[in-house]
Amino acid sequence: MKIKYYYSVLSPFSHLGIDRFIDLAKKYKIEIDEKPFDLVGEIFPNTGGIPVPQRHITRQKYRLIEIERIGKKYGIEIKLQPKFFPPIDPHLPAKFTLAAIKDGNRLTFGKECLRYLWVKEKNISDLLVLEEICKKLNLDFQKIQELANSEEITKTYLENSKDAIKNDVFGAPTYVFENEMFWGQDRLEYLEDKIK
């Protein structure tokens, strides 16, 4: 069995759900098909979404309430307004994540990008920060960087986004199991119901 996992390395809700999702997949011995995608550049414009800074102030305020509420409920550290959100280049950390996946390092690089952005308040579009993550995970930075800049990874990044749109995915994180979609970390219990 396999779960398609669509997410953005910029999403606070992906950060808030990642550990519980991994635990759930391990519990039921389900493979995760990890699909980092371009939430702001591809998903939002093609599904009616609006980037955070362009949303009405009431929606922006409530988003922060929800992030804080979820973090407290599950004991997850998260900064509500980290210094480097959104990062200058949202695509580079996603491509590094895809390169790490291609290199056999599944789920860890994306998880670290989320942690570095939402907990450590680091600029994950900075090559020095990406190098720091590589070192932490014992990855060859030069190899990952070269792969991240390749046409193959650029193509995969776009394909993940197009595949998400084709499957009616409009936000992050989204889990697809047996062709049924579950949007948001707050739908993990429903995903577990489906698995059971």
Image: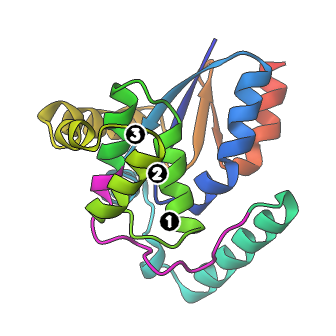
Q: Residue at x 53, y 35 (%)?
A: 107
The residues bearing labels 2 and 1 have C-alpha atoms spaced at a distance of: 12 Å
Please provide the residue range marked out in magenta.
77-93
Please report contact status of discs 2 and 1: CB closer than 8 Å, yes or no: no
The image position of residue 49, as x and y in percent, is: 45, 61
The residue indicated by pointer 3 is: 165
**Residue 40 seen in this snapshot:** yes
- Mark 3 or mark 1, which has the lower sequence index? 1
The one of 50 and 100 positioned closer to us in this rendering: 100
Amino acid identity at mark 3: Ile
Question: Mark 2, mark 1: which one is toward the viewer?
Answer: 1
The image position of residue 78, as x and y in percent, is: 67, 69
The residues bearing labels 3 and 2 have C-alpha atoms spaced at a distance of: 14 Å
The residues bearing labels 3 and 1 have C-alpha atoms spaced at a distance of: 25 Å
Amino acid identity at mark 2: Ser
Magenta stretch mostly in which secondary structure? Answer: loop
The image position of residue 41, as x and y in percent, is: 30, 58
Tag 2 secondary structure: loop
The one of 184 and 69 positioned closer to us in this rendering: 69
Question: Is-magenta flag for residue 86?
Answer: yes
| Residue 128 as seen in the image, left or right of residue 47 | left
Amino acid identity at mark 1: Leu
The residue indicated by pointer 1 is: 117
Q: Residue at x 30, y 65 (%)?
A: 126
Question: Is-magenta flag for residue 32?
Answer: no
Q: Residue at x 38, y 46 (%)?
A: 134
| Residue 54 as seen in the image, left or right of residue 180 | left
Decide: is 32 above or below 17.
above
Tag 1 secondary structure: helix
The residue indicated by pointer 2 is: 8
Check the picture and name the quadrant holding the N terminus. Answer: top right
